Amino acid sequence: MRSVRIDSLKTLGALTIALHHIVSYFPGAALLPAALDAGALAVLGWFADDARFMVQFFLVMGGYLTCQSLVRSSIGDAPGAGFLGRIGRALGDRYIRLAPELWLAVLMVVAIKLALQTLHSPALDLAWVSDFPSASVLLAHATLLQDILAIPAVSAGIWYVAIDLQLFAVLCCISLLGTSSPMRLPLAITALAAISLVWGQDIPGGDVAAPYFFFAYGAGALASMAQQRHRWALGGLAVLSALVIHQAVVDPQVRPFWALGCALLLSLPRGPALSEGLRTLVARASDRSYAFFLGHYAVILLVSALWLHPSVQGLMGHALHRPENSVGWVFCFIMLVLVGSAMLAVPHHWGSQKVRHALRSLAALHPLATFSHRSPRLP
């Protein structure tokens, strides 16, 4: 049964991250501070800085849904396979679940960059636009190794996909090692999440690997079990809550509070049911949120090139030289990014499903393939 709470958080999170990137990347957004009052400027500042912490919601929901999926699936009972074989098959299925949207997002960015190169667009000189990718760079992105190899990302959000796969692998290993006792799995997750919170954040350059983010992912996994009133999982959340409060005194950080708050919200019993129409609307938006999350960067790049085009600058004319008049133009272009990203997410999601179906058909031909096809929905 789908969770309206999860679907709503996925949609809200994707929209918030898109607005964060628009405020950070779109060149017209630089005109806003001079034209806004103190209240609106505070909201703009939040989207430019703190909105990025919504990624913690994605990580928590990833752990929550992965734990649910591992409980339902038969990963620990796959016949004719050892530990590494079962982990490999689970990772293969997860990669097939993650990769198509990423591939299409990268291809869209590459195609737009190629067109902008042909047009000699000044958008390619923006600080946040990486160089045109070589074959080796594209291979690094396809294998999700770009951050580990210190290669600048072609598009926004790719780092999250790589971290999700790593975290999924860690939770799979824990689940296989901890199935013999009802207390072993939540205790192991609690221990690793605590290590991530206390020491994982201090690893230099550690934000390219799973230990840095496992606190949020582990909290989500515990929330999944706690919602079923699993007493060891409830105890694990209590321990993590105490650690977060202690860390706030020793080394104040906002990120753990976002993750813990989301985990505690997801651990609550299901709320009252919504109407069928509203549930369907939220579910459809949620299904396309992953494509929206990965595809909006391409739209920002395209709209930024349109904004910087000499003919558009000439059309807007003197309005850009008067802050109070520029807000309307900037708002129109921001809406163009949002509407364009939402519209693009529909064929992006549809195309990804087709690619995913083809990949699973090919994987099924392998004599050892036993994919469950029950990987969790993406946060």
Image (cartoon, rainbow, N blue to C red):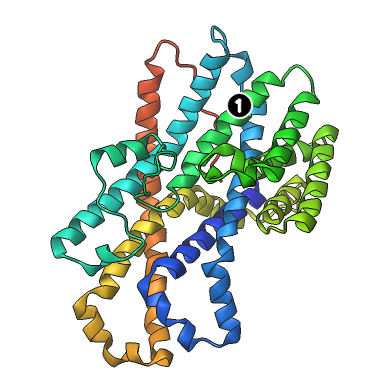
| Residue occupying the far front of the picture | 204
Tell me the residue at 45%/32% (across/down): 95
> In the visual, does 132 lie left or right of 40?
left
Question: Which residue appears at 24% of the width and 56% of the height?
Answer: 113
Crowd class of label 1 (few under 14; some 14 to 19; many from 20; radius 10 Å): many
The residue that mark 1 highlights is 172
The image shows residue 3 at horizontal and vertical percentages of 65, 46
In this rendering, does residue 376 appear at all? no
* Residue 115 against residue 200 in the figure, above or below: below
Q: Could you tell whether 337 is left or right of 229 in the image?
A: left
Q: Is residue 163 left or right of residue 22?
A: right
Near-viewer residue (64 or 155): 155
Q: Which of 249 and 347 is in front in this view?
A: 249
Residue 127 sits above or below residue 196 on the image: below
Amino acid of disc 1: Cys
**Place of residue 154 in the rendered image (x, y in percent of width and height, measured from the top left):** 34, 50
Residue at image location 30% in from the left, 40% down from the top: 138
Residue 239 screen position, x and y as percent: 82, 42
Pick the quarter of the image with the N terminus. top right
